[in-house]
Image: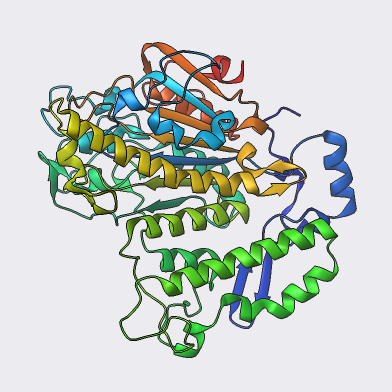
Amino acid sequence: MSPSADRSELLPGPSRRRWLQGVGATLALPLLESSLPAAVRRGLETSGASSQPPRVVYMYVPNGMHMPDFRPRTIGNDFELPPILQQLAAHRGDMNVLTGLTLNGARALGDGPGDHARAVAAYLTSAHPKKSDGTDIRNGVSIDQVIARQLGDRTRLPSLEVGMEQSAAAGNCDSGYSCIYSSNLSWRDETTPAPKEANPAALFDRLFGRPASLEPLAGPDPERRRRSVLDFVQEDARRLRRGLDRADQHRLEQYLTSVRELERQMTRTDRLEGLDPDDPEYPRPAGAPRDYAEHMELMFDLMALALQTDATRIITFMYANAGSNRSYRNLEINQGHHELSHHGNDRDKQAKISQINQFHASLFCRFLDRLAGHEVGGERLLDRTLIVYGSGISDGNAHNHDDLPILLLGGKGLGIQTGRHLKFRKETPLANLHLSVARLAGAELDQFGDGTGDLHGELLG
């Protein structure tokens, strides 16, 4: 069996337990190898394949990158980490820096300004979106949805779309381009984006709370709202523990602790004046934390648990919508991000852009830590996950779409050779990377977008 083979094909649905059940509640479980039938375990051991299926995560950073602080100066394994990548130093051995990739669909191609909207719309579709701020939008199908069409029926959620800001339904956001383009990374078809979830409480309920037919955790009943989802499934959890070996018992306890800690984090966000968040009558917040870092950490923790429980194997994430002008007062940066990206070679503005990029990377490191810290059968979740991190714009001032800032992280268990800076020939389509990722994830795909082939030779060699 090849390094990228998905051993979940050997695991028929009923053969492994995937839920804890309670009165009015269900909780997805991570893979517990001792819960597999003995014949299945023997077959997996004999084949030498992984018990973890491939996962794919796409991360989008708005407004480009300060490239001098992102791109290493030397090619190959022995390169010095520039300031932005230093934030990921703990995962240097899990990272490939990819230089030379181009997103041609984000270029004007006769349509004039609107680079930010085009960059997001084209990032995963490799299409050139139709310039419109009305109802006649047209884009392409994004690579995450191409993969989901083939593999999404193996999980409860075919794909998961997440971000720090909600998707827009209409409006003019960028020089005649609809806000739909600016705020949606994932596209189910040419005219239908897949809106993202930005509310951590709603995302938690969707992943770990109640089935859609039952009242959500954040519903009107204060008694149900303030109780942990674990309260409803604890009896089933006790029964399950008795049939697990020590390693899986420990794995289950770690998981349940993570779920409870997430609930506590959400309860403590955006404290209401005069109320104690540890009081059982304290209302569970219905929205996102006001603190950007706290909000992002919650979203990353939820995404990690979604992969750990195999609720989905395909995730897209946006740090902000295209052209975001968020200020970062926690970094003592009062100007907006988009405003600073038009730096005009001003060194002070460039330094602030680099600070923002480093801040994003430092928070992203938490997500990598979570995936690296979860093991099944001696293999890290990160080794079975392909993460594409980057932007559809290189330098925000130039609005160029060539030589993009792209990282590929994880994937060792899928055959990826990591810890390198790879330089591709000029104008190599970003679609080539998408094709490789899709194939490594198990999708059968001959071509994608404007691609000219895959990058298997470089990534696996």
Count of all numbered marks drawn on residues in the image: 0
Q: Is residue 234 above or below residue 42?
A: below
Quarter of image, res 460 = top right
The way the protein has been coloured in the rendering is rainbow
Q: Residue at x 44, y 40 (%)?
A: 58
Q: Is residue 256 left or right of residue 183?
A: right
Q: Is residue 52 above or below residue 252?
A: above
Q: Is residue 178 visible?
A: yes
Image position, residue 459 (x, y; %):
56, 20
Q: Is residue 269 above or below residue 413?
A: below
Q: Is residue 351 left or right of residue 72?
A: left
Front in this rendered view, residue 263 or 229: 263
Q: Is residue 28 visible?
A: no
Q: Is residue 398 above or below residue 289?
A: above
Q: Residue at x 59, y 46 (%)?
A: 371
Image position, residue 242 (x, y; %):
84, 70
Q: Quadrant of the C terminus?
A: top right
Q: Residue furthest top?
A: 425
Q: Is residue 398 left or right of residue 8?
A: left
Image position, residue 406 (x, y; %):
41, 28
Q: Quadrant of the N terminus?
A: top right
Image position, residue 23 (x, y; %):
63, 83
